[in-house]
Image (cartoon, rainbow, N blue to C red):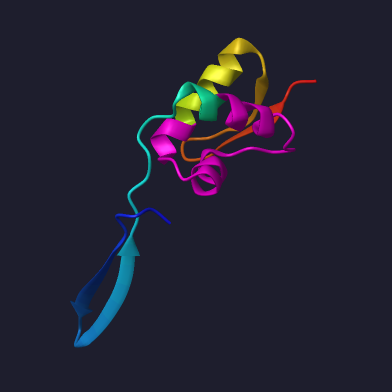
Amino acid sequence: MSSTDKVRKKRKWGKSFEYTSHSRQLNLDSGSQETVENEIVKMRAITPSMIASRYDIRVSTAKQLLQDMSRRGKLRLIIDSRRLKVYEPVE
């Protein structure tokens, strides 16, 4: 978890809920981007949410990373719907 995680309380209908909000990295530096790309190529199916949760980055950053890898020919888009994009590595 990040060092800036916060526990917040929310009241709804007389019940109080506690949840943590995560602050994730906005950009990847070049060294960590290379390691992420090398590990992504070994996976069978890749989604932006998988990458974001595994490497603690934002989903928007993971989407940009996967689109860039797809343009370079390292990944192929399998499923393209409005909400879900699934990639697979090109061998």
- Residue 51 is covered by the magenta coloring: yes
Quarter of the image with the C terminus in it? top right
Residue 45, x across and y down, in percent: 69, 38
Please indicate whether residue 36 sits to the left or right of residue 56 in the image. right
Q: Which residues are magenta?
A: 34-62
- Residue at 50 percent across and 26 percent down: it is 65
Q: Position of residue 7 (x, y in %)?
A: 28, 69
* Location of residue 79 by image quarter: top right
Which quarter of the rendered picture does the N terminus lie within? bottom left
Camera-side residue of 20 and 30: 30
Magenta span includes 9: no
Main SS category, magenta section: helix
- Where is residue 16? Give x, y as percent: 24, 83
Tell me which residue sits at (74%, 33%) in the image.
Answer: 42
In the rendered picture of this protein, how many numbered marks are placed on residues?
0
- In this view of the protein, which residue sits in the foreground, 89 or 7? 7
Residue at 47 percent of width and 40 percent of height: 83
Q: Looking at the rendering, which quadrant does residue 57 occupy?
A: top left
Looking at the image, residue 22 lies above or below residue 26: below
